[in-house]
Amino acid sequence: MAIRKWAAITVTFFITVVYGVCVYGSEIHDRIIPPEEYTTESHIFSRIIEDANKKTAGISLFSFESLDDVIDMKSVYVDDSNNVRALFFEYSGKEYTGNIEVGIDGNIFEVGGEPDSKGYVYRYFDAGEAVVSPQAVEIQFFRGSESSRKITEKPVKIVEGEADEWDVSDDGHTILAYFGKDNDVTVPNFYNNKIITSVEGYADDENWYNILEANENIESFERVTISDGIITVGNFAFYGMAELTDAVLPETAELIGGAVFADSGLTGDVVIPENIKEIYAYAFMNTDITGLTLNDNIERLCSYAFSDCTSLRGEIKLPDTLYYMGTGVFYECSGITGGITIPGSIEVIGDGAFFNCSGLDGELILEEGVKEIGTLAFGADGAKKINFTSVELPSTLKKIGPYAFQYCTGIKTISLPEGLEIISDGAFDHMSGLEDEKMIIPSTVHTIGGDYNVDENTGYGGHVFYDMGKNETFTEFEVAKDNKYFKAVDGVLYSKDMTRMLAYPRGKRDTVFEIPEGITQIDEMAFSRAYYLKKVILPDSYVITDDLPENILNQDANSLSGALYVYTSVNEIGVKDTNVNYTTVDGILYSKNMTCIYYIPNKYTGNVNIPEGVREIEKGCMFAPNKGNTNWNNIYIPSTMVYMDKNTVEFLNEYFKDYVIMENSIYYETDSDNTIQEVPYTYGDVNMDGNIDDKDNALTLKYISGILENGVLFNEKAANINMDSYVDLIDIILNFDNYTE
């Protein structure tokens, strides 16, 4: 069975759907963290509260408030003889006046009372005060000489709850618990002679409980019918009820609360009643619902409302009234199909709204009015892909969020609109199906990259255009005239001032590329998937760093190896004779004095023979997923090696254990399994005799003075007491505190 409208009407279902944790792509380091990891223990309660507070407050421009402005009629209740027994309405005026009257089929009654905390005003009647038709009743409100418009309502039949079967809130209007024994339960709209307006669980210190939490008499709760007249199906009401498979929502419902059916056994088709405007966070998360029909009045779909509904099937249709789509609304709903049209009433598409919805296989249309696409809004993790056939972007679009279209591999062409201002990290990551020959950056774009997982833009792009387009077709970037921030030269994308290189098109046919002088920054993956390129020549202005900003995912790379990444055809790095920082031998990059090795191209072919005298293997020097992604054979490491990046050591031990030839030294050695190990040392014991004394400081002083004799045992790592990478007089002074007693 399924959630369906309370009224017994025939509905032809037009099936539609609406929606942290680390996910991994198919390639090393290519991992994307969705917008928010969520667990029921730490996030649901706070997310529900957060979303509930994200409402747009109306602003009145006039001091006068008419009755039609401030009174929202809810329900009129009748007994089996059609005697009116109660009514309630919502009052939203600034000040409630006690002279309000209500007309019921022409008979006038004083209302009295005061609005409760929700703004509800209740009026109860004695039997015989008003008898009405069971089909319709005419309601009108009066305040002095003022009258409201006439409203025609269908009376709601009273469903009285059995005594002692229910627990209610202090004001008597909210059902909180069920103590009966039935597994087919009807939630009443009247209890203890009071109107019931809502049913909900409750929270206590960020723990939450459904309406069965204190029930010791029931083994299963399979079906629930929520009576007409109830306005709110509230937070956690049926949360976690594994046996609950069928629920009936009332026509009068206006709000579906947070996590109300989350992790329950709910199944079948869901039909959202016409009066419901909001569905709060996690409402149907991780249920087995198979279909969903939204009404034409829905305004807000809050975070993770339908996340992990993997049985959900059909095409999505979002109404034009929808203006808020929270984080992960359809997260991991892999069974939904067809295309998506995002109405222009939604200015911001929430992070991960359709993340991993791999069944989507039609057009993606963003209507005029949409301004921002959230992080991973239409992205996938690589184990899954999104199969949109095309995408249409509006002129109102200002920002494409991080990884917004990651793994949308079916889209063949994309046109960026004038007016676009921000292209985020990973925006077009793995859009490998694009057949465009060029990408044109609009004149209005002022920011590319630098914004994933950081508070302020770093100005350093990551993954922005990675694996975008086809080798056969994508040959150039072009920047629209009058763009003040970016330019393209020979199809390569740069900052306007030519200090930053952003991207090299993968299909550009050149085999050798010399980076222009003046470039000081090369973005992450700027060269990735460059199919034809064999050699990159660095400018004198470029200095490699391993201090990468936090928006860069490949933190175990250095700036150069991150820019070249893994999947290119580059087998040689070159520098000019004028370069004061670097030199190359056989296409491998070293420091100018040949003491440090900075980068070995993955497509370098043959044995990697690191020369004697090289003392350091820098971070990111060997940057690959595994041996299969390199053309390297054996790797020779000399005895002069003092410092090796720990990630590099781990990489060699995992993938090159049988291919490393290493001369043991006081710093590194290999065991019987040819695993590289750092030789243990103690700070201060520079001669490694087990004591820390004047002999150690004397050797350190000779080392600093440059008069240390050849062959004398001296451990530079042990001498660097303050671990600042330099051995100096400060280390000698600090070492006095380490002296052996």
Image (cartoon, rainbow, N blue to C red):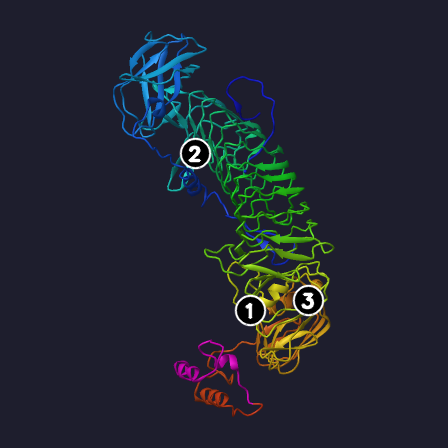
The earlier-in-sequence mark between 1 and 2 is 2
Relative to 188, residue 390 above or below? below
The label number, if any, that marks residue 520 in the structure image:
1
Indicate left or right for 101 with 617 as reference. left
Which residue sits furthest front?
482
The picture quadrant where one finds residue 660 is bottom right
The picture quadrant where one finds residue 537 is bottom right
Residues rendered magenta in the picture? 712-741
- Determine which residue is flagged by label 3: 602
Q: Tell me if residue 726 is in the magenta stretch.
A: yes
Q: Amino acid at mark 3?
A: Asn
Q: Position of residue 286 (x, y in %)?
A: 54, 37
Q: Position of residue 294 (x, y in %)?
A: 54, 29
Distance (Cα) linking label 1 and label 3 = 23 Å
Indicate left or right for 739 with 18 as reference. left
Q: Which one is in front in this view, the residue at disc 1 or the one at disc 2?
A: 1
The earlier-in-sequence mark between 1 and 3 is 1
The reply to whether residue 558 is visible in this rendering is no
- The residue lying toward the viewer, choosing from 352 and 85, is 352
The label number, if any, that marks residue 235 in the structure image:
2
Q: Amino acid at mark 2?
A: Asn
Q: Which one is in front in this view, the residue at disc 3 or the one at disc 2?
A: 3
Q: On the rendered image, what quadrant is the N terminus found in?
A: top right
Which residue is at a point 41% across and 20% down the rendered structure image? 189
